[in-house]
Image: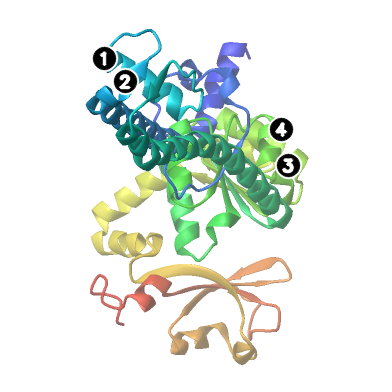
Amino acid sequence: MSDKSKRGAAGSAGSGWNTSDDPYDDVDDDGYAGTLHQPERKLSPGAQVGVRALVALGCLAAATLVTYIGRDGYADASGQPITLLSALYYATVSLSTTGYGDIAPVTPEARLINVVLITPLRVLFLIVLVGTTIEVLTRRTRELYSEKRWRNKVDHHNVVIGFGVKGRSAVNMLLQSGERAKQIVVVSTDPLAVQEATRMGVMAVLGDARRDDILRQAEIAKADNVILATDADDTTVLITLSVKRLNPRANVIAAAREASNSDLIKASGATTVIPTAEASGQLMGMATVAPQAGAFMEDLLDPTKGLEVAQRPATRDEIGLAPAQLRERGQIALAVIRNGTMYRFDEPGVKVLQRGDQLIVIGQSRYSKENPTSDGRGAR
């Protein structure tokens, strides 16, 4: 594969809204430093600098105006009259504490004005200048400390590679299912996608997920689940191989654009492969020939609606019950997982539930329970 082809394939690993054939055309290689991006809750650095610059200019303008209005109380060592430019010069050297002394207040009124007005403006001006420098240093120190603390604590988290439509949907599903935002890391080559991810409250890494250093920035070795939502199956295979090499125990869930590539992606190490195009087509076909069945599947796929599919352990009071008896408790058991083997509802093998069993059930979604009148179907 040529360098150009590799770069073109890698771009889809983090595709967000970039519609170019080669997403690398818009981003220089230096942009892939692999820096961890954390959720921002304050003004951007540019906005903060802009506010401070306006305050500094305001102080300078106020000092210039005060000096020019009271220019009769000032003397220039050159004997020239105090002009507007002279007033600006005096304000500049005074607020910056340079103080050449060639222009000085000579009358009591001008000196009083310097004490009452110019001195406070000088203090504010210095606070803005020094404060900006200190803020930059402390913010970077704070970010480094926060990142180090996150890296020390993060474990068993979820990594989502690619933040296009599929990636955003996966993150939304994780958040709606109760996963903590700090337990989700997005990897994307698109700076806009990284910004969008951090606005959602999750962590994000800007870079090409085929690179080991980028995956390590996402703490891939500690991750339990890795979701590959890329736009090219060859890229998915390459990333899967890298992920499994760095973390053999990771549960890799990958999307396949073509069903014919599913076996290849599984052979590279993916645990679950979802052929997105075929799945969408089947759902659309179902909605056409069986509208009610299509609406039911839409309900199951959207956790904000009435029903959801969930996997959970069997509770203490369920042990000894037949899976069919869960219906009396408001849930339908689709399958029972025992000792790593899944038994579907239509297969023999599980007569009663035992300690340690995992259940795959259909039940009322958490969102419906918390918002029973959200769409008219929550109260069942």
Report the residue at 37% width, 17% height from top. 89
The amino acid sitting under disc 4 is Asp
Q: Identify the residue position indicated by label 4 in the image.
A: 212
Mark closest to the chain's N terminus, 1 or 4: 1
The amino acid sitting under disc 2 is Ala
Q: Quadrant of residue 214?
A: top right
Residue 71 lies, in percent from the top left, at 27, 23
Please say if the residues under marks 1 and 2 sit with CB atoms less than 8 Å apart.
yes
Kindly report which numbered mark, 1 or 3, lies closer to the viewer in this rendering: 1
Q: Identify the residue position indicated by label 2 in the image.
A: 87
Residue 362 lies, in percent from the top left, at 45, 73
Other residues around mark 1 within 10 Å, as few (<14) / some (14–19) / many (≥20): few
Using the image as rendered, state which of residue 287 and residue 179 is in the foreground.
179
Mark closest to the chain's N terminus, 1 or 3: 1
Q: CA distance from mark 1 to mark 3?
A: 74 Å
Mark closest to the chain's N terminus, 4 or 2: 2
Other residues around mark 3 within 10 Å, as few (<14) / some (14–19) / many (≥20): some
Query: What secondary structure is marked by label 2?
Result: helix
The amino acid sitting under disc 3 is Lys
Q: Identify the residue position indicated by label 1 in the image.
A: 83
Q: Identify the residue position indicated by label 3 in the image.
A: 244
